[in-house]
Structure formats: structure tokens, C-alpha cells
Image (cartoon, rainbow, N blue to C red):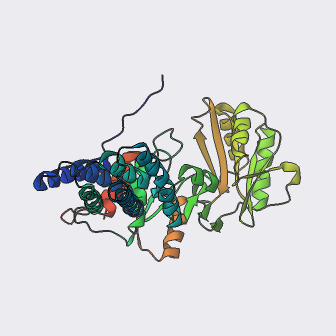
Amino acid sequence: MHDHALPHVGLRMVKSAAAVLICLLVSMLVNREEMRIYSSIAALLCVQPYVEDTRRMALQRITGTFIGSAAGALAILIEVYLLDIRGTLAGYVLIAALILPTLWGSVALKAANAASLSCVVLLSITVTHITDPNPWIFVWNRVVETLLGIAVGIGVNAFQLPRRKRRDTLFVSGLDGVLMDVGGETLAPASRVRLNRMLDAGLLFTVSTVRTPASVREAAQGLRLRLPVIVMDGAAMFDLEKKTFLHTLLLPQDLAMACCRVFEEQGVHCFLNGVQDDVLLIYYGELRNEAERDVYEKCRVSPYRNYVSREYFQECPILYLMGVDRTERIRALYDALAAAGLTEQVKVRLDAAPEYPGFSYLKVYEKSASRQTMLEQLKADLHVEKSVMLSSLPGQGDVLVKGGAEAVKALERMFEPLLWQRDRSA
């Protein structure tokens, strides 16, 4: 059995319930029983995660309602006043025939997404209410009720308590164990929606991670990151929109080759990660264990990674070296690098490989490469003085947070606190 975490009751759920309640209360006040269902449905559909989704859904509802109502009005004219064929075979043939211009009209008005709704409105008029003493009343009520529900949905979705927004501060977060739960491959949908809403509201936000640009792109899929990201543990800054490296800290060629020789002496395969004309090139040789073979097979299909056989290596600028092997062999490799005096000239990082029990990673970067250094560079590029780093590890950032949804909530509290709340991150 797979573990399944129950979802939290989100703000959209609360707003949806509130919108329906308002529609029901209005229907009680005006004593219109049928208003309850049509206005509630319209309001419910208009409570969307993003403002643009709400606008699009509202426009679809309005367009579909008017097209369907116009087709229904035409059916009333023909069935009731011209031919008197309500409830007959001819009447049903007419209803089916009116489906065609209803669908065509939706497409012609560039509202194809509202086509099915137009037909629903048409059918509700012609099938359910055509035999009413005055079917025109239903047509009118259907339009009014839908517009009421749309207005309620938009109003409730736009409502929020008065807040101030900190648009002068750069917020930075890690990915693994911070924005994403430990072991997670992407952001949770609810966290992505909340982050995107803040980004649309002017949040200055980026991520700082040991991952490569390709890995960040995959993990943050759907996240509207507009600022450059700090990648490769501070060895580079990458613009995801322009697909370009803005800043890099390259390994000196002689040190990179010296480290490669130690890798070979210790029997550990080395991936050379270089960048040439904004293209990430990963040079590899003979794969020697199941972990690195799995890494290669998973990553080589990515359009953002370019694996090249080591025999074609021609002094490409190198960002970092990487090896993945049994933990004891990786530790021996580190000791060998230290014995050769290389750990004093380069930055070496060791990490366990949780996806491969018993294995670890060893990565070699330029000596001065650090996330903090690259963060200061980003602040200078953006002309921003203040920054807040979120971390799930003590001593690793400015604000200690729990990972996943709790980190996004903490970011929300810091970026847009209520007017009467004190700024705890300053």
C-alpha cells in the first residue's frame, strides 16, 4: 500500500463554500427557489486558483448563457407562437436542429469552451421549461441568476483581508526539503498555486539549490519563476526564461584535470559538467555502477541536458565534477583528494544519495562558489538591498521553516502580512 497524505482544507475550498452560501441566502431573500442551483453553479465555477482563470471562466459562463438563451428564445418563438409543436416529435427535431447553430455560434464568437454550456442552457429552456405558462420568465431568470452567481464568485474570489506587500525584499528558498517535501519530485499543487499568486502580486522570489538548471525546471514545473535561479550550489546563476547562464564560477582547467586523475586512480567514474554557449554539456566515460547508470538513463532523455562521450572532450569550461558510488569509495576518494592537496584549492561537497541506499555523491566546484556569494550578485543585479533566505536546516538561512506547504505558508506570512501584524523576518 502507498502512503496517502490527506489534503489540507485550502482557501479555495473555503471561498467556494462561502460563494455558494451567499447565492443561497440571496435566493432566500428574493424567494426564488430555482435561483439557488443556477447562481450557485455559476459562483462555484468562477472560484478559480488564479485571477485570469476566474476571468476566463466568468467570460465563458456569460457567453455560453447568452448564446444558449438566444437559441432557446428562438425555439420558444417557433414552438409556441409559430407552429405550436411543444412536446411533439417535430418539437424535438427542432431542439436537436438548434444544437448545430448553438455550437457554431460559440465557435464563431471564439468561445469554443462555452459551446457545451450554451447547449445546456438551450436544453434547460426547451426541454424542461418550454411547457411553462410563460417560458420567457425562465429565460430571463436564467440570465439574471447566472450573472448573479458570476458576480458573487468573482467578488468572493477577489476578497482578502487588508495586507501590506514587501516588494522591496528578495526572498530565496531551497527546493529539496524546503519548498518540496523530503523525497518529493515536484511542488505540491496547492503550494504551486499559492506561490504563483504571490509572484503575480509582485513577490521577488527565487530558488537556490545544488540542482542543475534542468533539474530546477523539472521540479518547479508550472511555477512562474521570473527571476534568475542560483544553481549548482552557487557555481552558476541561470535565467530560466531566457535559457542563459548569467554568471558562472568555473573550475580552473588544471585543477579540474588534476581532480579527474584522482577520480580515475580511485576507480570512481567522473561526470564533467561544462557549459558552452549557454548549453550544459555533461561528458561521461565508462559507467561502472548501477547508480550512475540509472542517473544517466533518467537524465539523458531531458532536452535540457546534453550527454557527450568523454572522447570528444576538448577543454570545455567546467562548472563542476560529479561522482556517484558506494559511500565507502566516495569517502576514500575525498581522502585521496585531500592527500593530493586539492581540497584546499577547490570546493568539495559530499552528500548521501537517498534514492540509492548505500551510495553517495561527491561534487567538486570552484573554490569560491557559494550560494551566498551568488545571492549577493543577484541582489546587485536587481538593485535590491534586503533579502530573506528560507531554510529547513538550522544555521543555513535567515528563517527556519518546515518543508513543503508549511514553508510556502511562512513565505506568505512574510511577504504579505496583515496590516496589524508585526514583521517577524525583519
Percent across and percent down for residue 59 are: 40, 64
Quick check: can you spot residue 43?
Answer: yes
Residue 77: x and y in percent read 35, 60
Q: Residue furthest right?
A: 311
Residue in the picture at 79% in, 37% down: 287
Q: Residue at x 30, y 65 (%)?
A: 426
Left or right: residue 322 compared with residue 133: right
Q: Is residue 400 visible?
A: no
Horizontally, residue 310 falls left or right of residue 223, namely right
What residue is shown at x 76% (from left), y 38% (from top)?
A: 268
Q: Point out the residue furthest to the top here.
A: 1
The residue furthest bottom is 383
| Residue 209: x %, y % from top left | 54, 53
Q: Is residue 112 left or right of residue 358?
A: left
Q: Residue furthest front?
A: 83
In the rendered image of this protein, does residue 176 appear above or below residue 238? above
In this rendered view, identify the residue nearer to me: 343 or 356: 356
> Along the line of sight, which residue is nearer the eye, 376 or 141?
141
Q: Nearer the viewer, residue 425 or 175?
A: 175
